[in-house]
Image (cartoon, rainbow, N blue to C red):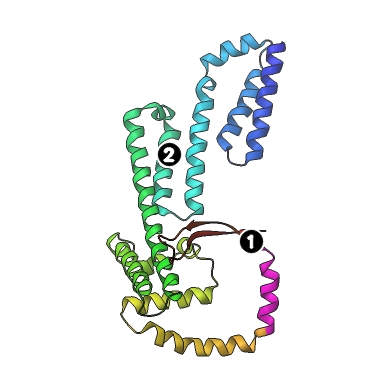
Amino acid sequence: MEKLKKALELYRLMLERMEKSGHAPHQVDYYKECIEFNKAFKTGDEAMAEMRKSHLFTGGGDAFALDDIFNRKWAAEENKEDELIELYANRYNEVKNNPKVIMDYTKTMPFTQKVQDLEIKISRRRENFVQVCQGYFEMKMEIEGSEDYELALTKIKGGYGKMEADGKPFFEAASEEKYRNLLFIPDEGYKIFLKGVEQIIANTNVKQAEDSDMEGQWADLKANKEEIKEVGKSELKKYRLGCCFCESPKDANGKYTYEHCVVEEA
């Protein structure tokens, strides 16, 4: 009887833990079923002997595998990665219909390889998009015509070209929320950034076009100066610089560069 009480308590605690997580629906069902199953017996040994004959003996592993795929699909949905969503949805249905497929190496490895290839592609596209962004902001900090200015332009065009070749053109990506969220700038600033990249790719005079745009924007800013200052004060309190990657200069006269800056809530 003591063994049975301990088993029931263990299942209860596991059920509580899975319910609190909010990300283990299949394991929740599994532990509920284990509790009901064990209640039908008088001793722990009897319950365990019967459990070995039932689907519950391997059901915990099956439930864990389904929750793992379920959560990966959920993460893909949160990041709006349609190809990954489809891949995990198909895998989920496959495992749900036949849990033993998890142990089949010949079927698991091709799926794992597909996921890896897709995640590499997603990462590569984001890196190329970020390269364009970094190049643009580096260009804005340099003197037009200087060596560093030209290097920044090359970085922009290089990232843009790689995105075109990779089947995910820059402006198509820029219209998607997951790429837009890679830049912590206001919507108006994002529009200016996109227009600047468009002018660079078209080989137009970026500075002249931006100067024209800035005149109108500067007038709007001056008209709303006090309101903007108050909003800035309240918003600034909410955030702080979390961390960044700092690269030292190659020589004594070089510049420090800062990349991958992360802003976090205070």
Question: Left or right: 66 with respect to 112?
Answer: right
Residue 176 in the image: state x and y as whole percent: 44, 64
Q: Is residue 7 visible?
A: yes
Which mark, residue 93?
2
Q: Nearer the viewer, residue 155 or 248?
A: 248
Q: Main secondary structure of the magenta part?
A: helix
> Magenta part of the protein: which range?
226-240
Classify the position of the N terminus by image quarter.
top right
The quadrant in which the C terminus is found is bottom right
Depth check: give the residue in front, 49 or 134: 134
Say few, some or many: other residues with alpha carbon within 10 Å of mark 1 (under 14 / 14 to 19 / 20 or more).
few
Q: Is 81 positioned to the left or the right of 185 in the image?
A: left
Residue 164 in percent (x, y) is at 30, 65
Residue 86 to residue 110: above or below: below
| Above/below status of 129 relative to 35 | below
Q: Verify whether residue 128 appears in magenta.
A: no
- Callout 1 amino acid: Arg
Q: Which of the two labelled residues, at mark 2 and mark 1, occupies the earlier sequence position?
A: 2
The extreme front residue here reads 252
**Residue at figure coordinates x 68%, y 63% from the top left:** 238
Distance of mark 2 from mark 1, alpha carbons?
43 Å
Which image quarter: residue 227?
bottom right
Instruction: Please state the horizontal and vertical placement of residue 96, each as a whole percent of the image.
Output: 45, 34
Q: Secondary structure at mark 1?
A: strand
Q: Is residue 39 visible?
A: no
Three-letter code, disc 2? Asn
| Number of the label disc, if any, that sits on residue 240 | 1
Q: Residue 18 in the image: state x and y as whole percent.
A: 63, 35
Asked whether 139 or 11 is in front, the reply is: 139
Q: Residues within 10 Å of mark 2 (few under 14, many from 20)?
A: few
Please report contact status of discs 2 and 1: CB closer than 8 Å, yes or no. no
